[in-house]
Image (cartoon, grey):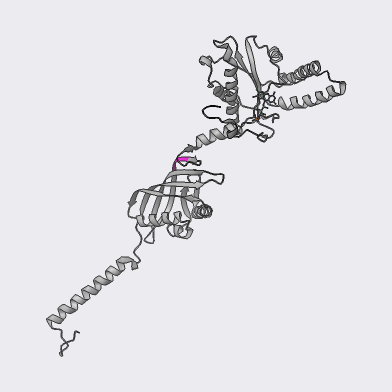
Amino acid sequence: MTSLTPGGYLDLKQLIFLLTAVFVLAGLCYSISSAGGSRRPLSIRETFDLYVRSAQNADLEGLFSTVTDKDKFFFVTGGGKLIDTRQGYYEFHQRWFNATGWEMPVELLEVYEGEDYGYTNAIFHYREEIPEGGSYILDSYFTLIFHKEDGKWKVVADICAPISRAVAEANPEIRYDLDQVYLFDTIKQRRTVRKFKPTPVPEEHIMKILDAARFAPTAGNQQPWKFLVVRDRDTLNRLKGEALGWFLESYENERKPDREQLDRMREGVRESLGGALSAPVYVAVLVDSEASYPDYVIYDGTLAAGHLMIAARALGYGTGFFTTFFPEDKVKKFFHIPAEYKLICFTPVGVPESWPEMPPKKSLEEIAVFEAF
Ligand SMILES: Cc1cc2nc3c(=O)[nH]c(=O)nc-3n(C[C@H](O)[C@H](O)[C@H](O)COP(=O)(O)O)c2cc1C
């Protein structure tokens, strides 16, 4: 216990003791405050950590404690959309945080803390489960820009620059980038279309479609094809009438129908031909039977037609591998096609009146056989 001298003065020993006690107490107070009890503002790195932790836990309030209080905000989403208000940034996160089945590990690359401004540069690896199975993956740089507001670092901009987007199926090691997904979808979405809108098809699109067709494989690279493009409406209308006659003639010869059956058939075929020939563009896919490997020209032509149809689908057009109404000998005569050319198919190219439902397709299990039958 310390006590003052009777005269009210401290002796030297007491003075040393008192000063030591004051220093110890001051040190204690300082260390308590540094241990977290203080109001010391967070550094940019700490603010970034809080931001990321909050995002990963879908904690909207935590995230927005790091975001500017002002309405002006600059956000470029991973999808390339610009959101330029704090409210918009808030709503984006509100929607996102309501979703489930996602995770987003983050790698911090760089932190710069200046006087009033600073930034962090990081990569996020976003992965979200797709309801149909598999997952959607987005790897993106994201740069946060910080501004000091009332002494605290606040995020004022968030810019995402995607590195890669992919989907993964059951095996997460096998990723498909979005171009590949698009290609598979386009192949699956190609449909035989039998009725079209009159919407014109620009010549640029026709050439783009034929350009894809010419990259199909051919026997010995013989490329034996010619693509006859028909756009003239009068010619197509004339073809409609002729094709009706061709069909009915062979129907009569083969089936010997009575008058009523013939009339019914005429009406049905007229209607079918009306739809089948309603497109603004037709392509007769032809192959030269005098090419180097004539036994293979049919395969070459069919593969080209396949390419053509998928390319047309990619541009939003329907097609059809039409054969029945367009017998080779008649079509060749109609269009003055040289004798050596074989007709593979006569396909429309046009905007569908509506996209038909996909007809039933066999399952993979039914058709895939491994090693040997
Ligand atoms: C060799 C071949 C001949 C075809 N002939 C015709 C035809 O004469 N008329 C027609 O409307 N569709 C014809 N098609 C289209 C098929 O009916 C169609 O591809 C099939 O029903 C599957 O529908 P999707 O093409 O929409 O997948 C033909 C297809 C091929 C491959």
Left or right, residue 346 beside residue 296: right
Q: Which residues are magenta?
A: 161-165
Q: Residue 163 in magenta?
A: yes
Determine the residue positioned at 51% across, 47% down.
129
Residue in the foreground of this view, choosing between 33 and 158? 33
Asked if residue 323 can be seen in this view, the reply is yes
Left or right, residue 68 beside residue 284: left
Q: Position of residue 94 (x, y in %)?
A: 52, 55
The vertical placement of 196 against 71, above or below, is above
For the view shown, which residue lies furthest in the right direction? 259
For the view shown, which residue lies furthest in the front direction? 373
The vertical placement of 252 against 154, above or below, is above
Ligand 1 shows up in the quarter that is: top right
For the view shown, which residue lies furthest in the left direction? 12
Determine the residue positioned at 15% across, 81% down.
14
Q: Residue 179 in magenta?
A: no
Determine the residue positioned at 50% across, 41% down.
167
Q: Quadrant of residue 269?
A: top right
For the view shown, which residue lies furthest in the bottom direction? 6
Q: Position of residue 325 (x, y in %)?
A: 72, 21
The dominant secondary structure in magenta is: strand
Q: Position of residue 33 (x, y in %)?
A: 31, 68
Asked if residue 147 can be seen in this view, the reply is no
Q: Position of residue 60 (x, y in %)?
A: 48, 58
Residue in the foreground of this view, choosing between 138 and 229? 138
Q: Quadrant of the N terminus?
A: bottom left
Determine the residue positioned at 84% across, 23% down.
261
Q: Quadrant of residue 346?
A: top right
The vertical placement of 91 against 190, above or below, is below
Q: Quadrant of the C terminus?
A: top right
Residue in the foreground of this view, choosing between 182 and 39? 182
